[in-house]
Amino acid sequence: MTRRILVIDDDAQIRAVASASLSLVGKWDVLTAASGPEGIVQATEHQPDAILLDVMMPGMDGTATLRALRASPGTADIPVIMLTATLGADGGPPEFDDRVEAVIPKPFDIMGLADQVGAAMGWEI
């Protein structure tokens, strides 16, 4: 079974690098979206197995996008992994509540991204 991952990030380069890493290393189908609203549409239409969601985006940020995904019955149960360059109080990635599977700090290891996603989701690579 091929997994489908949706990457929501406003940075085209991040989307391209993450997409290449996840498809080449993880052998997954990858969808991308450049904004929260676009990501919500993609998630609703394609029902990915997981979403990688950037925290800092213009307009609808990652936190607002996550709230919207969780509020819709069609996307409420899709696992979400946050991508962030923002540091928490302890110098590590910020903590989110139990609505997210994991937090992956940016910059991420290109060749290790699929392993990080797989570990967070309990998937074999």
Image (tube, rainbow, N blue to C red):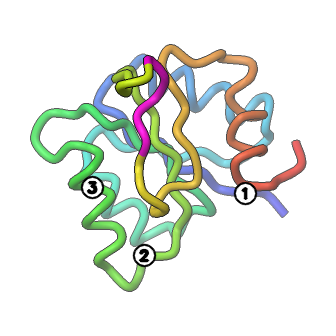
Question: Mark 2 — residue?
Answer: 76
Q: How far apart in space, not on screen, are marks 1 and 2 (Cα)?
A: 18 Å
The three-letter amino acid code for the residue at tag 2 is Ala
Q: Residues within 10 Å of mark 1 (few under 14, many from 20)?
A: some
Mark 1 / mark 2, whichever is N-terminal = 1
Is 19 in front, or is 69?
69
* Residues drawn in magenta: 91-95
Q: Which residue is pictured at 25% across the width and 66% down the height?
A: 68
Residues at badges 1 and 3 in contact (C-beta under 8 Å)? no
Q: How far apart in space, not on screen, are marks 1 and 3 (Cα)?
A: 22 Å
The three-letter amino acid code for the residue at tag 1 is Arg
User: Which quadrant of the structure image shows residue 91?
Assistant: top left
Residue 54 lies in the magenta-colored region: no
Q: Is residue 53 left or right of residue 66?
A: right
Q: Residues within 10 Å of mark 2 (few under 14, many from 20)?
A: some
Query: In which quadrant is the C terminus drawn?
Result: top right
Mark 2 / mark 3, whichever is N-terminal = 3
How far across and how far down the image is residue 18, in percent?
A: 56, 28
Q: Which mark is residue 65?
A: 3
Mark 1 / mark 3, whichever is N-terminal = 1
User: Which quadrant of the structure image shows residue 88?
Assistant: top left
Q: Which residue is pictured at 84% across the width and 63% down the height?
A: 1
User: Which quadrant of the structure image shows residue 76?
Assistant: bottom left
Question: Helix or strand or loop: what does disc 1 sit on?
Answer: loop
Residues at badges 2 and 3 in contact (C-beta under 8 Å)? no
Question: Mark 1 — residue?
Answer: 3
Q: How far apart in space, not on screen, are marks 2 and 3 (Cα)?
A: 11 Å
